Image (cartoon, rainbow, N blue to C red):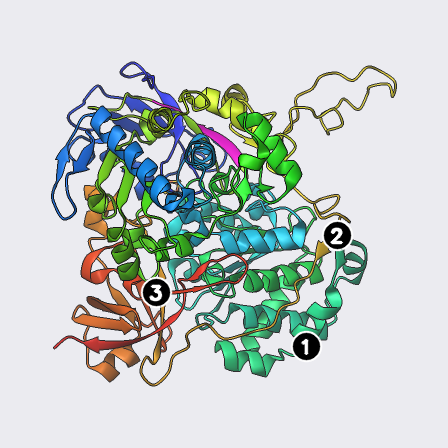
Amino acid sequence: ATPGAPVDTPVDTHCPYCSLQCGMRLRPTGDTAGLPVEIVERPRFPVNKGALCGKGHNAAAVLAAGVRLTTPLVRDEKGGPLREAGWDEALDRAAAAFTTAGVRYGRDAVGVFGGGGLTNEKAYLLGKFARVALRTSRIDYNGRFCMSSAAAAHKAAFGLDRGLPFPLADVARTGCVLLVGSNLADTMPPAVRYLREMQEGGGKLIVVDPRRTRTADLADLHLAAAPGTDLALALGLLHLVIAGGHVDEEFVASRTTGYGAAREAAMAHWPERVEALTGVPVAQLRRAVELFVGAGSGMVLTARGPEQQSKGVDTVGAWINLCLATGRAGRPLSGYGCLTGQGNGQGGREHGQKADQLPGYRSITDPEARQHVAAVWGVDAEDLPGPGVSAYELLDTLGTEDGVRALFLMGSNPVVSAPRARHVTERLCALDALVVCDVVLSETAALADVVLPSAQWAEETGTMTNLEGRVILRQAAIRPPGQVRTDLHIMHELAARLGREKGFPYDPEEVFAELREASAGGQADYSGISYERIRAEDGVFWPCPATGEDHAARPAMSAPDAPRPSIPHPGTPRLFLDAFATPDGRARFADVSHRPAAEEPDADYPLYLTTGRVLAQYQSGAQTRRTPALNGAAPGPFVELHPRLADRIGVRDGELVVVTSRRGRASAPAKVTSTIRPDTVFMPFHWAGEGRANTLTNPALDPTSRMPEFKVCAVRVEKTS
Ligand code: SF4
């Protein structure tokens, strides 16, 4: 049972959407037919200081009866309609489907697909559910589509992946921010304050984006590189840093390794070559370097633009190289950071719903890690499955001889959000059984054989980890309506039906206690964090071990031989200031060179397509398209194209165009604007149906992160006749 607060009693919590996890206060209204909570400011929470974007302001709309699921649904035969069912029938069917697929085709015929918006408790229990209750290796999650390239590059360079290795507030005090492939002004507007403060203090903002977005409008310099060329751009800037004598030789010598190869690669990317590859004029390249090295400190922040590429890991590595060569890493107010997208994009990747990971950011192939987690779970390490396959690889083979036959999907909508979405939809339809937990009947839930209605953000308690690595607490303000249950409760019930009566608690604090134990000693160590501390401290940054005698909070006045007081670890807002988390404490340069996108424009498909978000919608739109105020502001898809391109194909603003790639066609009204490169078209990816941008996108995978190439593919655009 999830507790709810009495009417009018305010409850501090966080927005259900992006990784900023803005603090907000909910006041239950008692209006179960309309909006059950009122959202009010929570000015004390340091990240957003009371500010919310339109998505946050309107987040109560999805709690309203009428837009959401309130009862389980089942389908009696393939192609037949969904009908209402009781919990026992729905859960029995789901468990029977998993058992049947496992018995018929082997344990890996059952799969689990999670989400980057799930609380830490859910992400943790879902990983355990897959490996202990289902005993399958086939688990991955939609966060693979979000920040996996940055995570892999971060880990390779610094030995540890945390989106931002410093608090967001540090951005306001740095000397220069190089923002690569992020439209912060639309995706997380309250964070723009930090950029403005930085500029007001004399700092400079450089934005890299093929579109002149609202964020690029704020910049001191906008580099409109062609999609898929961010790697070449980073190498070109490093070339100019080296040629201009701006390398921080002392930093490179004392705190890094691998500079030689990085230097060689950069020297092969001279400015004129980089201009030809990226379309960014040499003068702008030189100006970017002047601004970046001219400030005493600096940051490179990347988002999905450079990351969602088939060379995403190398691309991020090249930007990290720029930080390392200039000594902008592991120092106060400097560093590389990834602006994670989904609400729990950070925590979602730490607790075991990734195919290759166990809780605490442990590798599933590390024998010591397996022993530790198996002991917490009360199972034999030999019984834990090994690594599975990545998200797209899992979806791509659904229903095939070697693929998953019965899928348990929680908090994700791949019909809209997966690359090559028409194919993925076909694969979902080919499953023997699809079981979906969701708050609304999303496009994916509508295909399911069993739909289990889940409680949502204001109705359940659980932790999230925001883009800074700050672990925060969402608190239940109201009880869920109708027959709705929490995802933790659903997993508890399913596990019991699969023969695991014990080990799947559904009280979130109990799950968190186990998560802390499982994470202890791992890189993402939560063992010193408690709900009580989070409430008292407005969040706690990991790593935060429970046993931290030597940490900085130890009183400096203590005599050296005095007994060590038991002082809670303070958490770690800033990483790498003394040493990087690699075995030798040095950061590693990446050895990378430019290579083209998996699919470049040609005679048949002469344009680049790039995709992204708009201010009033979020991810697959499952919630925001059901929010009247947001849907009114952004009611449908569009195709952004340059006036020269519009002239060439004879289309005017607002007329319907068809965009075709090698994977399919999508159509939407043209939005003619000179803010985009003439060789590029842009579509937002929040919609299903004819305007589904992901019908077009290319599932070519990065060899390391297995990230699909969402951000660049080749298309042609025609006016509809
Ligand atoms: Fe919510 Fe993100 Fe908007 Fe903040 S910026 S209110 S977390 S959607």
Nearer to me, 245 or 61: 61
Decide if residue 639 is on the left or right side of residue 328. left
Give the crowd class for mark 1: few <14, some 14-19, many >=20 residues within 10 Å.
some
Q: Which image quadrant for residue 659?
A: bottom left
Report x, y in % for residue 465. 49, 36
- Image point 19% across, 42% down: which residue? 628
Q: What are the residue bounds of the magenta stretch?
A: 470-476
Decide if residue 388 is on the left or right side of residue 40. right
Q: What residue did someone put label 1 on?
A: 267
Mark toward the start of the polypeptide (1 vs 2)? 1
Q: CA distance from mark 2 to mark 3?
A: 38 Å
| Label at residue 586 | 2
Q: Amino acid at mark 2?
A: Arg
For marks 1 and 3, give the one nearer the viewer.
Answer: 3
Mark toward the start of the polypeptide (1 vs 3)? 1
- Image point 15% across, 43% down: which residue? 77
Relative height, residue 215 to residue 284 (above, below): above
